[in-house]
Amino acid sequence: MKKYILDLTVRAVEQLSPKHVLIRLTDDKPLPEMFPGQFVEVRVDGSPSTFLRRPISINFVDKAQNELWLMVAMVGDGTRQLGRLKAGDMLNCVLPLGNTFTMSVSPAEKVLLVGGGVGVAPMLNLGAALKEMGCEPTFLLGGRSAKDVLELDIFKRYGRVCLTTEDGSMGEKGFVTNHSVLQEHFDRIATCGPTPMMKAVARYATEKGIECEASLENMMACGLGACLCCVEKTTEGNLCVCKDGPVFNVKRLLWQI
């Protein structure tokens, strides 16, 4: 798939929580085609301690508005600098990178999309694509507290939303793998979030015999498979998450499940 290096214009930056911003980008030409699960590598300008690009999951593609949405967790100097962007600024992006979630899904299938923390970001784009195909997914989203539950109103446009928070301030109290919705039958699961959460989801799927894909969040400096800092052990040997992933069927991962 062709990759592009583009200077995109910041249309808006929205504060989703004290630690998260949503950056809406556009261009004077139609944006390249992008698929659920893919990501971009952004160049961070103005941060003297940030030398490498930062990988950011594609949160949503609004084709009608010609917008690309990136959800950024401000956890270091580089991502805090991204959070300071303003409308009219330019952001240099390499895109689209990585592979995609399996999209050969029939409308009759029950699909569960599990996201935790900033890992909810790619679940929105995937859910919107599934809804467009006639398959309405169930979202299972988790956070530490209510303030960590992001984009809730938008998720509700594309499917049923189930919530967990560790402190019980929204939804059911506990982790996503404790939610009562897991008593229902699902044909397919996709997940993204903290590795312990994804391993727990993978374990659940394996025990139930459900096909499951996970979008890994290994450190990815180049996005092209050159720097080898994102290598993951798989049944096929060591693979680069940025090039061979980030989406993997959990059966390929040598996780202790």
Image (cartoon, helix red, strand yellow):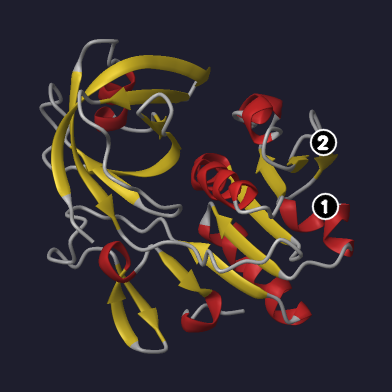
Q: Nearer the viewer, residue 49 or 183?
A: 183
Secondary structure under the numbered disc 1 in the rendered image = loop
Residue at 82% from the left image edge and 36% from the top image edge: 171
Q: Nearer the viewer, residue 128 or 14?
A: 128
Could you tell me how far apart the alpha carbons at marks 2 and 1 are, in whole angstroms? Answer: 9 Å
At label 2, the amino acid type is Gly
Residue labelled with disc 1: 179
Answer with left or right where residue 33 lies relative to residue 216: left
Residue at 24% from the left image edge and 31% from the top image edge: 78
Answer with left or right where residue 41 lies relative to residue 65: left
Direction bottom: furthest residue: 236
At label 1, the amino acid type is His
Place residue 76 in its image quadrant. Answer: top left
Q: Position of residue 36 (x, y in %)?
A: 45, 52
Q: Nearer the viewer, residue 24 or 31?
A: 31
Estimate how packed mark 1 is, as few (under 14), some (14 to 19) or many (20 or more) residues with alpha carbons within 10 Å: some
Direction top: furthest residue: 87
Q: Position of residue 148 (x, y in %)?
A: 62, 30
> Between disc 2 and disc 1, whose residue precedes?
2
Above-or-below relation of 66 to 41: above
Q: CB under 8 Å between callouts 2 and 1?
A: yes
Q: Which mark is residue 171?
A: 2
Above-or-below relation of 195 to 122: below
Q: Position of residue 146 (x, y in %)?
A: 71, 27
Estimate how packed mark 2 is, as few (under 14), some (14 to 19) or many (20 or more) residues with alpha carbons within 10 Å: many
Q: Which mark is residue 41?
A: none
The N terminus: image quadrant: bottom left
The C terminus: image quadrant: bottom right
Q: Position of residue 217 (x, y in %)?
A: 41, 55
